[in-house]
Amino acid sequence: MRNRAGVNGLSGAPGCSWGFFQVKIFSTSARIALALGAGAMMAASGAAIAQTVPDSGVPQTGLDIPENLQIFGKLDPNVRKPTAIVNGVVITGTDVDQRMALIIAANQYQLNDQERDQLRLMVLRGLIDEVLQIQEAKTSDITITSAEIDQALGRVAKNFNQPPEKFSAFLRSIGSSDRSVRRQIEGELAWQRYLRRTVEPRVNVSEEEVQSILDRMTKDKGTEEYHLYEIYKSAGTNPQAVVTGMQDMMQQMKDGKQTFRYFAQTQSETTTGPSGGDLGWVRAAMLPNEIATAAAGMQPGQLAGPIELPGGYDLLYLAEKRQVLGLDPLASKLSLKQIKITFPAGTTQEQAQGRAAEFAKATQAINGCGAANQAAAGMGAEIVDNDSLTVRDLPQALQQMVLNMQIGQATPPFGSPSEGVSVLVLCGRDDAKAPTLPNAADLQYQMEQERVNKRAQKILRDLRRDAIVEYR
């Protein structure tokens, strides 16, 4: 659940969804929403029901807003300096800069000035939420000790491949600080504990609800499902500008200038944005017709959009396809040998291609993994064994290739002159077993956590509404 993923997120992989990025943005027009209950999240298959909220022209906000409104004056969000006082707690420009530096380093973002401004605004909102969460936790006498923060900080350091004793120096080197990370950890732990104490005891999922989901999973066995990511933008008063902007996003992603995750986190107007736009596993029947049609025609790794929806537009990225409770080839476990050659500094592209061609010829002549070590030595190549990868762990360009290989065969060479060229030799493959229905207790717990998350979102909205925030 996203609101409570904070500490797990912070102590997860550096590319994870970060707690301080958990800014919830709710669109006022038709949206895809993940829901539990009768139309539930399928734990074993990972499927989630997606629903739409009908749109009828002017958003039903409860406010007296005309359809053809006129804006008097101009609001420039960059006029205000990125500092705020939240119920008496000061957020400084340094706080924002240090948190931004951590996000940029964790995600390896390459940002232009406009993107930095967008990220700055998002970070400031996240820091405001963090203050509100800590303050609300204290109303229930919840405090986080230094020892607890130290323990979590060690996990964060590990995820950055840094020893704990050197982590402070590393944070300073990227423009962040130990204080900034400790504050984030405090906020995430405090909010998690607050929800566990005040919300979880009031949440209940019946055995009948759990059984209905298990029955549906059995009924849907074999149905194709998609692991989708989305970026949603409302149409606003200038739909063409929105479409043009989304087309520009797609081009930047195709050119490798920016990632889908970045645009989802900074541009998407949905609650999936902080998690990189992850919709999870969904079936066509769970999606709006426009999204279902697009997904059915996509292959893993492809982008689609802008897709017009009532009130806005979607960009889609398809990560994977599979069948509900069906065999998952990408879960097959592999035994591989990687043979790699590197090039001296100054090697030209032409020289690298010639060397790679010789390398390809030599590696394709390898007779199985038993001969790989000797062949590598004869080529002056490095060799690495790995018996723990699954097909899913490989880049998409190699996944289908490895699935079609026989034991002892090698892939074509891949790589670059600067990083070297490699082949993978397939030494063994253990095919994945068909998944079974999830344990009822595990499914019940997952459903309970989703309901806690929904309640947490409402609490945070109320805290924002009641907060006294002064911008400087």
Image (spheres, rainbow, N blue to C red):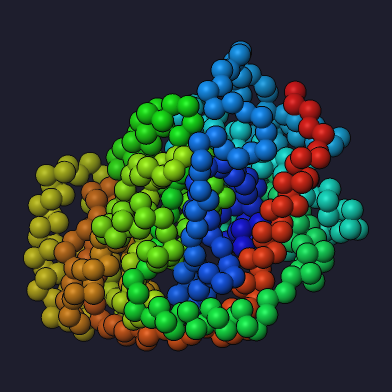
Q: Is residue 193 visible?
A: no
The residue located at (57%, 50%) in the rendering is 271
Using residue 332 as the reference point, say whether residue 99 is left or right of it.
Answer: right
- Quarter of the image containing the N terminus? bottom right
Give residue 246's quadrant in the image.
top left
Residue 409's place in the image compared with 13, above or below, is below
Using residue 263 as the reference point, say whether residue 425 is left or right of it.
Answer: left
Residue 215, x across and y down, in percent = 50, 83
Total labels: the figure holds 0
Residue 419's place in the image compared with 90, above or below, is below
The residue located at (42%, 82%) in the rendering is 219
Residue 270's place in the image compared with 299, above or below, is above
For the residue pair 412 and 184, the one nearer the viewer reads as 184
Residue 90, x across and y down, in percent = 80, 34
Q: Is residue 199 visible?
A: yes
For the residue pair 238 and 425, the one nearer the viewer reads as 238
In this view, the residue farthest toward the top is 73
Using residue 178 as the reference point, say whether residue 467 is left or right of it.
Answer: right
In this view, the residue farthest toward the front is 56
- Quarter of the image containing the C terminus? top right
Residue 451, x across and y down, in percent = 67, 65
The residue located at (16%, 49%) in the rendering is 352
The residue located at (49%, 65%) in the rendering is 49
Residue 312, x across and y down, in percent = 44, 40
Give residue 203's quadrant in the image.
bottom right
